[in-house]
């Protein structure tokens, strides 16, 4: 409720500032804090158990932070967290880092040694716990990427597909944007997903689905960049055309220069190898074969 006059307060501001309201807030704070309960104040055993429980929670948090930091360091350096199936679980990189830090952090060493005293003897070192650390870190990274992309006014979407070791096509979706504060261009991986429909429309729908799943505002997509394949660059049924159709506005398509350079280099090497193999059976030198391959590539 607004104030009624320049020097007069409204009913709500006057109530919030009165002594009775402040007293009730203080009583509520005392009630929420279990340390102020009369049964705890009168019973030393309950008070000691509560203090010990709060301290145990804090020690658990400190230990989990250390193990999260270990997981983040291993992921940042591109090192495997778990070991192979043939070796002992204790020889994994994660467990070796845990043992290393326990030798230099006494509180962490005591926390590991006290595991049998805790319910279920939990130490949070199992492969399941390690996977949970990875999942928590990945969610945090994904949230920060989403926040950075949505903070920028406009951004560009980049996508490409490639088969994995099981010959399953996977699409990588990347966002390129500019940090508002620093003005530096940044590229961040948004999503990796299996894709079955490699038509222009299928890939466009897959890109939009990835953006929606990561809570990215598609209204900020100002540009799109893909390779030169017909399914991506086609002006009628290609991915770049279908993106404009589904998002219902013009989105300029910028061909990926890196793909063109890679294609050009691969083509030139292919021609050089063919010329070199041909010249081995003739009187041409390797320098002449290179000259022939360069002339052929230009044509």
Image (tube, rainbow, N blue to C red):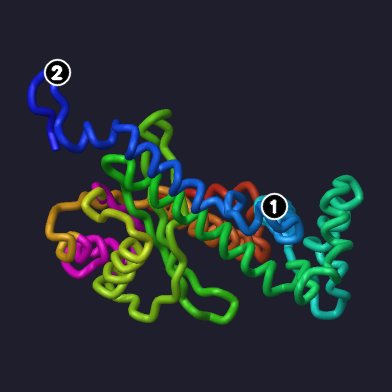
Residue 28 versus residue 85 in the image, above or below: above
Q: Position of residue 105 (x, y in %)?
A: 85, 46
Locate the N terminus and report the quarter of the image it occupies: top left
Q: Secondary structure at mark 2?
A: loop
- Closer to the eye: label 2 or 1: 2
Q: Which residue is mark 2?
A: 7
In this view, the residue farthest toward the left is: 5
Residue at screen point 8% across, 22% down: 5
* Horizontal arrangement in the rendering, residue 137 relative to residue 88 (left or right): left
* Horizontal arrangement in the rendering, residue 35 relative to residue 63 (left or right): left
State whether residue 63 appears in this view: no
Dot placed on the residue nearer the N-terminal end, 2 or 1: 2
* Horizontal arrangement in the rendering, residue 42 relative to residue 85 (left or right): left
In this view, the residue farthest toward the right is: 103
Residue 149 versus residue 125 in the image, above or below: above
Nearest the camera: 204 or 199?
Answer: 204
For label 1, the crowd category at 10 Å Cα-Cα, with few meaning under 14, some 14 to 19 and many 20 or more, is few
Residue at screen point 27% across, 43% down: 154
Nearest the camera: 61 or 275?
Answer: 61
State the CA–CA distance, disc 2 to disc 1. Answer: 49 Å
State whether residue 162 appears in this view: yes
Q: In the drawing, what numbered circle is on residue 58? A: 1
Q: Secondary structure at mark 1?
A: helix
Q: Is residue 236 highlighted in magenta?
A: yes
For label 2, the crowd category at 10 Å Cα-Cα, with few meaning under 14, some 14 to 19 and many 20 or more, is few
Q: Position of residue 246 (x, y in %)?
A: 17, 65
Q: In the drawing, what numbered circle is on residue 299? A: none
Q: Which residues are magenta?
A: 221-243
Residue 183 sits in quarter: top left
Q: Is residue 220 highlighted in magenta?
A: no
């Amino acid at each position: 409720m607004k104030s009624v006059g320049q020097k007069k307060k409204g009913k709500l501001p006057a109530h919030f500032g009165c002594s009775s309201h402040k007293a009730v807030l203080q009583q509520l704070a005392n009630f929420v804090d279990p340390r102020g309960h009369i049964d705890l104040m009168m019973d030393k055993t309950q008070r000691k158990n509560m203090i010990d429980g709060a301290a145990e929670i804090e020690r658990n948090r400190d230990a989990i932070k250390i193990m999260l930091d270990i997981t983040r360091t291993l992921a940042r350096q591109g090192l495997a967290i778990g070991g192979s199936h043939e070796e002992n679980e204790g020889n994994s990189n994660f467990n070796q880092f845990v043992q290393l830090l326990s030798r230099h952090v006494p509180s962490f060493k005591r926390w590991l040694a006290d595991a049998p005293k805790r319910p279920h003897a939990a130490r949070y070192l199992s492969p399941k716990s390690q996977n949970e650390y990875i999942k928590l870190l990945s969610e945090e990274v994904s949230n920060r990427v989403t926040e950075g992309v949505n903070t920028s006014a406009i951004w560009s979407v980049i996508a490409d597909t490639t088969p994995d070791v099981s010959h399953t096509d996977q699409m990588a979706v990347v966002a390129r944007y500019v940090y508002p504060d620093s003005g530096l261009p940044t590229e961040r991986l948004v999503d990796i997903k299996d894709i079955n429909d490699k038509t222009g429309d299928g890939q466009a729908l897959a890109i939009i689905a990835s953006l929606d799943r990561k809570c990215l505002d598609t209204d900020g997509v100002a540009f799109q960049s893909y390779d030169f394949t017909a399914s991506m660059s086609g002006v009628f049924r290609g991915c770049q055309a279908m993106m404009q159709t589904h998002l219902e506005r013009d989105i300029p398509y910028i061909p990926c220069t890196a793909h063109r350079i890679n294609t050009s280099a691969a083509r030139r090497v292919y021609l050089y190898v063919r010329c070199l193999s041909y010249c081995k059976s003739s009187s041409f030198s390797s320098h002449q074969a290179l000259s022939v391959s360069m002339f052929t590539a230009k044509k």
